[in-house]
Amino acid sequence: MTSILTVQQVRINEEIDIVHVRQAVREVAVSIGFSLVEQTKLVTAASELARNTRVHGHGGEARIELEKADDGTTTLRLVFSDKGPGIADVDLALTDGYSSAGGLGLGLSGARRLADEFDLRTVPGEGTTVSVGFRARKPARR
């Protein structure tokens, strides 16, 4: 049985809220022992998804969750949700280089590549929820 604990929720309405999401994610990642490289991946994915939530979803929220499995593994999960227009063509939106807002087009596809787990649920006219999971690596035994 897996237990899930929501550690923090951050509203995403203003540009500064993206910074708040990044800071919150980094703090949690450090607290459970993610390496600097893993922290960078987490914060990069969080930043891209928070920006998408604000720009394309017209605001929403980020939830930072810790998921503990029976086998002792921990997954740090980031869940971004909005009530925006949704994504009309998910396959196109997940294509590297595609941007509907004139950016680099690495937000969704980049976050998917960085994460161990990726889930996107969208309903045109109702909103989008993107969940990314990063498994904590167990230290090597000596």
Image (cartoon, rainbow, N blue to C red):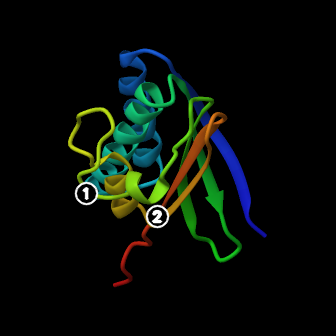
Given residues 126 and 8, the one toward you in this image is: 126
Q: Secondary structure at mark 2?
A: loop
Q: Earlier in the sequence, mark 1 or mark 2?
A: 1
| Residue located farthest toward the bottom when viewing the structure as drawn | 142
Q: Which mark is residue 7?
A: none
Determine whether, in the image, residue 38 is placed left or right of residue 12.
left
Q: Secondary structure at mark 1?
A: helix
Q: Can you identify the residue that label 1 sits on?
A: 37
Identify the residue at horizontal 44%, vertical 31% (top origin): 56
Q: Amino acid at mark 2?
A: Ala
The quarter holding residue 11 reads top right
Q: Residues within 10 Å of mark 1 (few under 14, many from 20)?
A: few
Identify the residue at horizontal 64%, vertical 58% (top origin): 67
Determine whether, in the image, residue 68 is placed left or right of residue 13.
right
Instruction: Count every numbered label the image shows and give the total.
Output: 2
Q: Can you identify the residue that label 2 sits on?
A: 136
Tell me where residue 51 appears, x and y as whole percent: 38, 32
Q: Residues within 10 Å of mark 2 (few under 14, many from 20)?
A: some
Given residues 114 and 85, the one toward you in this image is: 85
Given residues 94 and 129, the one toward you in this image is: 94
Q: Amino acid at mark 1?
A: Val
Tell me where residue 23 appears, x and y as whole percent: 38, 31
Identify the residue at horizontal 58%, vertical 41% (top origin): 128
Is the N terminus in the top left, top right, bottom left or bottom right quadrant?
A: bottom right
